[in-house]
Image (cartoon, grey):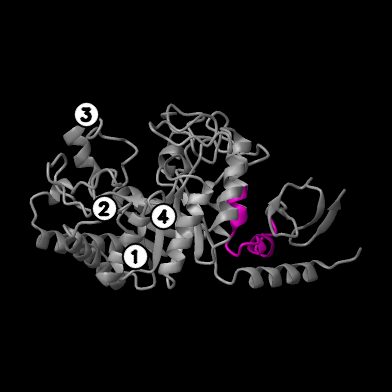
Amino acid sequence: MRISIKKLLAGLLFVATSVQAQERYVGGDISLLPNYVNAGAKYFDHEGKAVVDFLPWCHEEGMNTMRVRLFVNPKKYKVLHANDNNADTRYDSNACQDIDFVLPLCQDIVNSGHSLMLDFHYSDTWADPAKQWTPIEWENMNDEQLCDKIYEYTKESLLTLKEAGVTPTFIQPGNEISYGMLWGNLGTTSPKKAFMGSNANWDRFGKLLSRAIEACREVVPSAKIVLHTERVLQIDVMTNFYRKMQEMNVDYDIIGLSYYPFWHGDMAQLDKALTALETEFRTKNIMIVETGYGLKWQVPYNDIIDHTSIWPISDAGQMKFMQDLVATVEKHKSVNGLLWWWMEYNPYNTNLSGWYNAPLFDPTTGRASSAFRTLCSYGSSGTGIDGVTKQGNNEATRWYNLNGQRVDASTPGLLISKDRKKINR
């Protein structure tokens, strides 16, 4: 059988453009990568070969987007709570990403060919649906002053990045903001939350968001604004949030979701949530900006939903989760992004904590999990055509099947690379 590589690529490109016209964004949140690299963490590819330069390797594998979180002043939070044993206020060394920390990482991300998603937490520590504490330096400000401060801080942060040659493709003004942001001082008895069924604090929340977004539009007008929530398990709460944004004329581009099956339900639940969003908010793209599933042992959280009968805690089980997730989001044309949270987690060869267990690298060997390659198959075009056509002359040969998915060289069937084809029987 004589088929030219040029014809094969043309055929695959036709399939790619027919099936999915919009670009897809795939990658992960790698906010702690510098700490792992500095600690001597060893990363290996699927075949066990050492990864010399992490970000270029990820790009070669098919990833094109990386996410980084940004806290206001985690050092001040550390000083205040270093000796506090209360679990709600304990300092977490993983929440260390101030502007000085993220700047070189963001430079490395864009210089390696990736798009950057910048995730403003607007707090000195983790911001999520359980806590959205106002930064210590902002605690005594009234709402009007906070609106000015969030604008100034957002603008200053983006200008710092821009002057260093970094232009984010996506900006999140807030992290998992289902119930608002800047609730008040840590431990306040009257946090300024915004709940479904109540009008309290929604107007305040909308003004804060709009001022943050105003700064984003001024400094990086090309960036897409992502509003990030995590109520997939409560579809009414989730849709109410974006309905409120619409009512308040909040200027944004993309609906961002967290989806962790151990908190948010199975694929049927995610499918329902995506359908609800697509039906009501037809002009918005949707991105899964955080996801993850266990690899070697169950994730270390209480009150989780057990899916081990569907996806065992193993390399194969994690890959099956990833395959099912890709299949689910591919049913929804509005979805154009899929990012794995803390994918770089890897205590192998270090003395770093080994408590978390939903990375894309085996924490006992440093080797990329099978789910890594499955995630990459989601691809910027949905087919892996980019991987074939952009392969450098000095790179190790990368093989793809006729679905455009990256595969091992020994995979049965017709395989293609940039300048070769072969049939494995």
Q: Position of residue 61 (x, y in %)?
A: 61, 52
Q: Earlier in the sequence, mark 4 or mark 3?
A: 3
The residue at the point 56 percent across, 32 percent down is 313
Q: Residues within 10 Å of mark 3 (few under 14, many from 20)?
A: few
Q: Which mark is residue 257?
A: 4
As shown in the figure, which amino acid type bears the numbered disc 4? Leu
As shown in the figure, which amino acid type bears the numbered disc 2? Tyr
Give yes or no for residue 392 being in the magenta stretch.
yes
Q: Which mark is residue 135?
A: none
Relative to 174, say whether 33 is above or below: above
Residue at the disc numbered 3: 86
The residue at the point 27 percent across, 59 percent down is 157
Residue at the disc numbered 1: 162
Mark 1 vs mark 3, foreground winner is 3
Asked if residue 339 can be seen in this view, the reply is: no
Q: Earlier in the sequence, mark 1 or mark 3?
A: 3
Q: Residues within 10 Å of mark 1 (few under 14, many from 20)?
A: some
Residue at the disc numbered 2: 179
